[in-house]
Image (tube, rainbow, N blue to C red):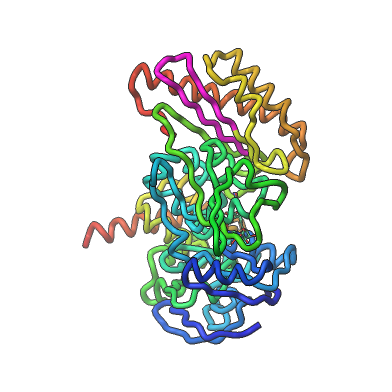
Amino acid sequence: MLPEFELLMPRTLPEALEMMNESSRVIPLAGGTSLLVDLRGRISRPQMLINIGGLDELRGVRVEEGYVVVGSAVTIADLKHNVLIAKHGQVLQQATRVFANPLVRNRATIGGNLAYGSPAADAAPPLLVLDAEVELTCKDAKRTVPLKEFITGVRETVRHPRELVTAIRWPILPEGSVGVFHKLGLRKADAISVLSIAVMLHRKNTEDYAQVRIALGAVAPTPIRVTPAEELLSGGPLTPEVIARAAQLASESTHAISDIRGSAAYRKRVITALVKRLLTNLAEGTKEKKHNESEGYHS
Amino acid sequence: MKAKAITLNVNGRRHQVTLFPNVTLLEALRDLSYTDVKNGCEKGDCGACAVELNGKVINSCLVLAWQADGAQILTNAGLGTMESPHPLQEAFADAGAVQCGYCSSGMIMAAKALLDENPNPSETEIREAISGNLCRCTGYTQIVNAVQMAAEKMMQQRAQE
Ligand SMILES: Cc1cc2nc3c(=O)[nH]c(=O)nc-3n(C[C@H](O)[C@H](O)[C@H](O)COP(=O)(O)OP(=O)(O)OC[C@H]3O[C@@H](n4cnc5c(N)ncnc54)[C@H](O)[C@@H]3O)c2cc1C
C-alpha cells in the first residue's frame, strides 16, 4: 500500500500551473517510475501530488528556430523511436536503448529523469554534450537554464517548487558532429549506471580541427562536463598522444565518488579507459567517413 | 484523501470503480479479480504486474489507478481462452516455460509487445525485451524458446491468411 496523499488531475498545462501556484508543496508526478518507488519506500512523504504525465502540451518532439525541443513528458520509449531524435540527437537515442528496461521506458519521462536530480540519470550525459537547456515554467513566467547549471547536487535542482520542467532543448548540431554514449552497469540490461559517459566530436573540413565535449554520469554528486579535458583537446588535432593525455586529465580532474556500485579508484580507472576508447573510435570513425564517405553514426 | 469514481476498461469489459488516489492500477486490477496480474516487487524491478495500458506494456505497480481512468487495459487473461489460447500462451505451455507460473503473465505481455513490433526477433532481442521481467525459477532458456516458437507460429498463421 502506498501512503496517503491527495492527487490533483489537471487537464491542461495552464490549469496545472495554476494549481502549482497555489502551494509550494505540490509534487509533480510524471511517469512515476522514481516517485512511486520512493513513496512506497517511504523515502519521501508528499501530501499532494499533481499528475502531469498526460498533459498534451508536454508531449511531442519538434524542431523550432534552430533548436530541437522535447516536451518534458515525452517518454524514453518515444525518444528511442523518434525520427527527429535519430537525426538530431543520436547520442541521446543511444542512451535510450540501454535505459532501464522496456516496461520502465514506456512510462519514464525525460523531464522526470532530469528533475529527479540523480547523479546516475542516463539522459543527462548525452544532453550535457548536446549543450541542452531546461525550460522551466510557472504561472506567470518562463525561464531557460543550461542543463549544466540545472542539477546542483544529489536530488537537488534549481527548479522552484512552483515551476514545472516543460521542455528540454538543444541547438541543432553543425554538420560533421558525431556523438557516442556508453553505459557501464553491473549487468547488461536494467541496471543503474556505475558510470556513464557521452562524447561529442565536431570536426571542420580540415582534419586537424576538432571540438570535443565530454560528460560523465554517476561519478560525482551531479552529472558533469569534463572541462579540463575538453579544453586540452579543443582545436585539435586528435593525435593518440593528446587523446591519452586528455583521458588521464579527465580522470585526475574528476572528484569521483565511492558507493555500493563501485569505488572512486575504480571509477577513475574506468574514466581514463573509456575517454580514450570512445575518443579514439570517434576520431577514427570520422576520418574513415571523410575518406570513403561511409555511413558513421551521426550525432 | 477523497475517493473518486473512475472507469477502467479491462480486456474489453468496462468497470466503474470508486477509488482513493493512492491505489495503484495493480491493486485495482487484482481487486476486480484480474488475478493473472501478479504482485511481485511493487517497485518496477520484476515485471510480474505487466499489462498493456493503451497499447504499451508497463508495470501496473507504478501507475496510479486514477492515471488509467478511461484507458484500455489488456492483461494476459485477455489474450486468449483455454479453448483458444494466444500463440504465446500455447508456446509457454508447450516449451515448459511455466514453472511456478508467477512471472508468466508479465513475461507473456512483454513478449507480446516485442512480437507486435518485431515479428521475427533474434535471441538477443528476445532477451532484451524481457529484461524487465524476472523469473525466480530461472527458466529463461525455455521462456526464450517459447517466444521463438510463438513467433514462428504467428508468422505461419499470417502467411496462411
Ligand atoms: C526498474 C527501474 C529501472 C530504472 N533504470 C534507470 C536507468 O537505467 N537509467 C536512469 O536514468 N533511470 C532509471 N530509473 C529511474 C527512472 O525510471 C528515471 O529516472 C525516469 O526518467 C524518471 O521519470 P518519471 O517520469 O518516471 O519521473 P517521476 O517518478 O514521475 O518523477 C521523478 C521526479 O521528478 C519530478 N518531476 C517529474 N516530472 C517533472 C516535471 N515535468 N517538472 C518538474 N518536476 C518533475 C517528480 O516530482 C519527482 O521528484 C529506473 C527506474 C526503475 C523503477
Residue beneath the point at 67% across and 41% down? A218
Please identify the residue farthest to the front as the structure is shown: A140
Quadrant for the N terminus of chain B in the image: bottom right
Which quarter of the image is occupied by the C terminus of chain B?
A: bottom left
In the image, B137 versus A115, the foreground residue is: A115
Judge whether residue A213 is colored magenta.
yes
> Is A223 positioned to the left or the right of B73 in the image?
right
Q: Name the quarter showing ligand 1.
A: bottom right
Q: Residue at x 36, y 74 (%)?
A: B84
- Residue A101 position, x and y percent, is 54, 53
Q: Residue at x 59, y 44 (%)?
A: A147
Q: Position of residue B113 (x, y in %)?
A: 43, 59
Decide if residue A125 is on the left or right side of residue A290. Answer: right
Q: Is residue A40 above or below residue B130?
A: below
Of A92 and B91, nearer the camera is A92
Q: Residue furthest toward the left?
A: B161
Query: Magenta part of the protein: which range?
Result: A196-214
Asked if residue A84 lies in the magenta stretch, the reply is no
Q: Identify the residue shown where x is 50% and y is 42%.
A: A92
The front one of B24 and B77 is B24
- Magenta region, mostly helix, strand or loop? strand
Q: Residue B47: x, y in percent?
A: 57, 62
Give the image quarter of residue B140: bottom right
